[in-house]
Image (spheres, rainbow, N blue to C red):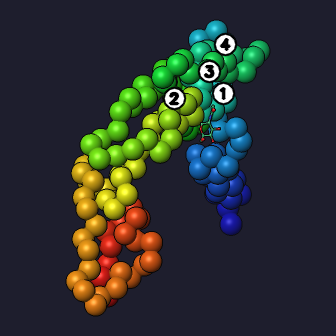
Amino acid sequence: MNKLLCCALVFLDISMKWTTQETFPPKYLHYDPETSRQLTCDKCPPGTYLKQHCTARRKTMCAPCPDMHYTDTWHTSDECLYCNLVCKELQYVKQECNRTQNLKCECEEGRYLEVEFCLKHRSCPPGAGVLQAESMQGPKPSTCI
Ligand SMILES: *[C@@H]1O[C@H](CO)[C@@H](O)[C@H](O)[C@H]1NC(C)=O
């Protein structure tokens, strides 16, 4: 194989690994005006927001999300997301919001979420069983046998 093509393929392979984020912590590219160079900065972890991009001399600065805000992924945002405050109708709070995750809600017992609404599990006709023993409580509609 042509030497140049070979090197190009190796380079391509390396950059593919790059973009698929095999590195940890995950990175992003940032143009540093001070040095006029493209720098490779660490992203910010869940529970924080990006305070300052990295420079040639120091790492990315991330700060904890303020109260009632969260981030749940590695990211490069300078703002946290605002927590949902309430659940939908017929839902209860499964997990309160904290810095690393939004409020989590679940339908009341005997109901499951269909797009936006908590619907009642249909009851099976007499003589027919429910496919899964727990499905009357589960998050999916019950299946009658
Ligand atoms: C938020 O709550 C989840 C679930 O209880 C927990 O795993 C996580 O550590 C909490 N994060 C913080 C920052 O307290």
Q: What's the mark number on residue 35?
A: 4
The answer to whether 31 appears left or right of 83 in the picture is right
Alpha-carbon span between mark 3 and mark 1: 18 Å
Ligand 1 closer than 8 Å to label 1 CB: no
| Residue nearest the observer in this picture, 54 or 39 | 54
Q: CA distance from mark 3 to mark 4?
A: 28 Å
* Front tag of 3 and 4: 3
Question: What is the quadrant of residue 139 in the picture?
Answer: bottom left
Who comes first in sequence, dot 1 or dot 2?
Answer: 1
Mark 2 or mark 4, earlier in chain: 4
For marks 3 and 1, the one nearer the N-term is 1
Give residue 42's quadrant in the image. top right
Q: Secondary structure at mark 2?
A: strand
Q: Position of residue 106 (x, y in %)?
A: 40, 50
Label 3, label 2: how far apart the Cα atoms are: 9 Å
Spatial CA span between label 1 and label 2: 21 Å
Q: Percent position (x, y) of residue 76?
A: 54, 28
The residue labelled by disc 2 is 70
Marks 1,2: beta carbons within 8 A? no
Residue under the image location 24 percent in, 58 percent down: 119
Q: Name the quadrant of the N terminus.
A: bottom right
| Residue position for label 1 | 41
Going by the picture, which residue comes out furthest to the top?
A: 34
Residue 125 versus residue 118 in the image, above or below = below
Task: Return the residue at label 3.
Answer: 64
Task: Of the two numbered discs 1 and 4 on the same chain, state the one appearing first in sequence.
Answer: 4
- Amino acid at dot 3: Pro
The residue most toward the right is: 57
Name which residue type carries label 1. Cys
